[in-house]
Amino acid sequence: MNLVELYPPSSMLLDLQARDKQSANEEMLEHLVSQGKLDQGAVKDALKAIKKRETQASTGIGKGLGVPHAKGCNFIDGLLGVYARSEEGLPYESVDGEPAHLLFLVLSSQETAELHLEIMKRVATLHRDEKSLRYLATSDDPKRITDIFREADEQFS
């Protein structure tokens, strides 16, 4: 599994309306529900799992990136993700104190914990690429965003 597979255009939310971390996580999970990828009844469990992960360390990794995630989720099969963009940015308790504009939600079942780690490494690659981050922060074109994800994926080929 790679970024292109986890974040196809149908999993992109390019006009995130949320104004805080909790609302952003809820909005991304509701997007998964609207896409038929997550049961409505699992949203509460997903929020709890993400919040539990946040108690270990903030998933606001800086440079405008937030990576809300949870491993070992017994309410899903496989790996689920949403890529979301907030033009205004939102407070995300980021390590650099800056607002988050780009969010990469990752939820994985127990069986896909290794794939979860692989996705996190690929997002870290984007984190180190200033040009890609600037482009992702301004692009409304899912095809071009997919191209950026593909470039990050190719670094692991």
Image (cartoon, grey):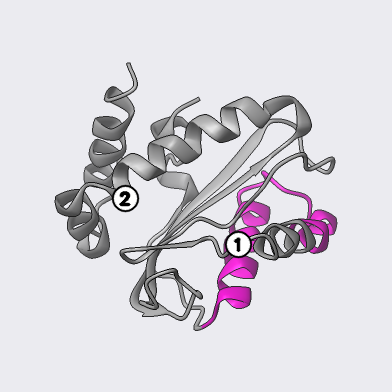
Report the magenta residues as a range. Answer: 20-46
Residue extending furthest toward the left: 131
> Is residue 11 part of the magenta span, yes or no?
no
**Residue drawn at x 67%, y 44% as measured from the top left:** 37
In the image: residue 54, left or right of residue 97: right
Measured as percent of width and height from the top left, residue 2 is found at 44, 28
Question: Tag 1: residue type?
Answer: Ala
Crowding near pointer 2: few (<14 within 10 Å), some, many (20+)? some
Measured as percent of width and height from the top left, residue 54 is found at 65, 63
Foreground label between 2 and 1 = 1
Where residue 98 sits, quadrant-wise, is: bottom left
- Which of the marked residues, 2 or 1, is nearer the chain's N terminus? 1
Residue at image mark 1:
57
Question: Tag 2: residue type?
Answer: His
Element type where label 1 sits in the image: loop
Query: What distance separates the C-alpha of mark 2 from that of mark 1?
Result: 17 Å
- Residue 5 visible in the picture: yes
- Residue 6 visible in the picture: no
Between residue 61 and residue 144, name the one nearer to us: 61
Measured as percent of width and height from the top left, residue 34 is found at 63, 56
Residue at image mark 2:
127
Between residue 17 and residue 65, name the one nearer to us: 65
Please tell me whether residue 31 is drawn above or below residue 1 in the rendered image.
Answer: below
Measured as percent of width and height from the top left, residue 154 is found at 28, 23
Please tell me whether residue 29 is drawn above or below residue 2 in the rendered image.
Answer: below
